Structures are given as structure tokens and as C-alpha cells.
Image (cartoon, rainbow, N blue to C red):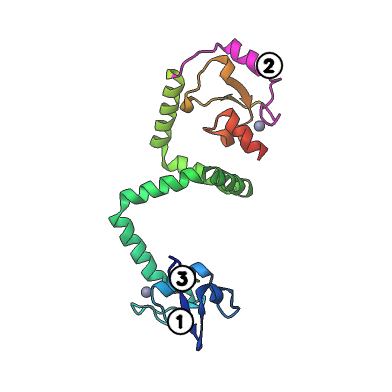
Amino acid sequence: MTGRPPSRVLTVWGETKPLVEWAKDPRCEVFYGTLFKRVEAEWDPVRAVTKDADRHLTVCKRGHSLVPENRYANGNCKKCSSVSTHAWYQANKERHKELRERWLLSNRDHLHVLQRRWYLENRDKHLERSRQWAANNLPLKAHYRRIRRAKIASAAGFATPEQVMLRMEFFDFKCSYCGGPFEEVDHAIPLSRGGSNWPANLRPACKSCNRRKFTKTIWEFRELLAA
Ligand SMILES: [Zn+2]
Ligand SMILES: [Zn+2]
């Protein structure tokens, strides 16, 4: 005897073989992992090997009608799912916030790509939305403007208008990232990331690059551009 536990077997349609073998069987519609979990949970064998195990059901456990509009592809009832999701959220708000933040952080680059794509495809909608938002949130907008001004004022360094123009001239008055028009003065290392107002940290950028760069450092942004 080896120390390994006996490999799990399953009997379906009068045929008994290990789960690994069932997973390879064309009649089995689920992957090994799913099959294993279902067998562990003591599902009925036929349901266990059926992908959409509850496709024959017309009502959920709580009696909601499982018409297509109320049924997820995995067979769950949309009404019940939203109720239980909401209940979990109510009971775990802190945890939800934590998970969401972690998810946002680990998907930051991917999200930027998606946002960028959405923006390019829906530029007008986006502009209209932000106009709407600004109109509805004038005090908030002023608040953010104040924060930004305070950040600029409290950051280390200082550049005279002449120095700024020299810096822009150094870059030929072109966006230092894409060669487009000089529309804004960008901080290579953003103030929010500890950058300074010294001339060396300033460079010309077009509006589009500057929005896209946002709080990334010049190196992070170059990486994104190269990707
Ligand atoms: Zn339901
Ligand atoms: Zn640019």
C-alpha cells in the first residue's frame, strides 16, 4: 500500500471508473475540478457530469420562475443571487471594500487599457458625461481644483515662466511622449507621487497623453506606451 488515498471513483449509467477517467469521457460535460467538487458535495452522479445540471428546472429553490430573463447561464436564479449577494455585501462592507481595492490594484493596467479603448470608441459620450458630471458637481469640482492647486503649491521646487518655456523649447514645443501638439505642462514624476516643480521635472505634453499618463511616472507611462 502506498500512502495515497484511493483515487475517487464514480458510477454513472452503470459504469464505474475514476474521476480522472470520467473527466476525459466525452459524455462528461464538466472539467475535472468541477466534477471533483460536485462528487465531494455528494451530487447525484448524472447531474454531476452534466454541465448545466439544472437545465431541466423551471423554478428555483425559492420558487422563482427560471425563465431565461431570470436565469444565469450556470442555472442560478438571478433574483436569489442578487438577494444573497446584497446580503453578503451588507454584512461584509469592510471586506468588500478591501477585496474591491485589491482587485482594482492588481488589474490597474488592464483597466487603463479598457478605459482607454472605451474612451476612444465613445469620446463624445464621455465628454457629454463629464460635462454633465461637472454641472451636477460644481462644488466637488472646485474642491478637487483646490486640492490640486495646494499640491502644486506645496510640492518642492519652483520654475519661473522663462525656465518653463526653456524646458518646452528643449522639447521643440511638442508633446514629449507622442510628438503631438504642446497643450499642457506635464510633471514627469507626478506631484501626487512625490515629483517636484523644478524645471527638470516639467515637459510638454498633449492633452490626450497627459490624461492618459495621469498619475503614472514617465517610466510607467513609457512602459504602457511600449506595450
Ligand atoms: Zn430564486
Ligand atoms: Zn502626446
Image coordinates for residue 85, horizontal then vertical, percent = 36, 62
Q: Which residues are magenta?
A: 155-181
Is residue 203 found left or right of 143 in the rendered image?
A: right
Q: CA distance from mark 2 to mark 1?
A: 73 Å
Image coordinates for residue 140, horizontal then vertical, percent = 39, 36
Find out whether the residues at labels 2 and 1 contact each other: C-beta distance under 8 Å.
no
Q: Amino acid at mark 2?
A: Phe
The residue carrying mark 2 is: 170
Secondary structure beneath label 1: helix
Q: CA distance from mark 3 to mark 2?
A: 65 Å
Q: Is residue 29 visible?
A: no
Q: Quadrant of ligand 2?
A: top right
Q: Amino acid at mark 3?
A: Phe
Viewer-proximal residue among 223 and 144? 223
Q: In percent of the image, x 59 and y 74: which residue is there?
A: 24
Image coordinates for residue 215, horizontal then vertical, percent = 52, 32
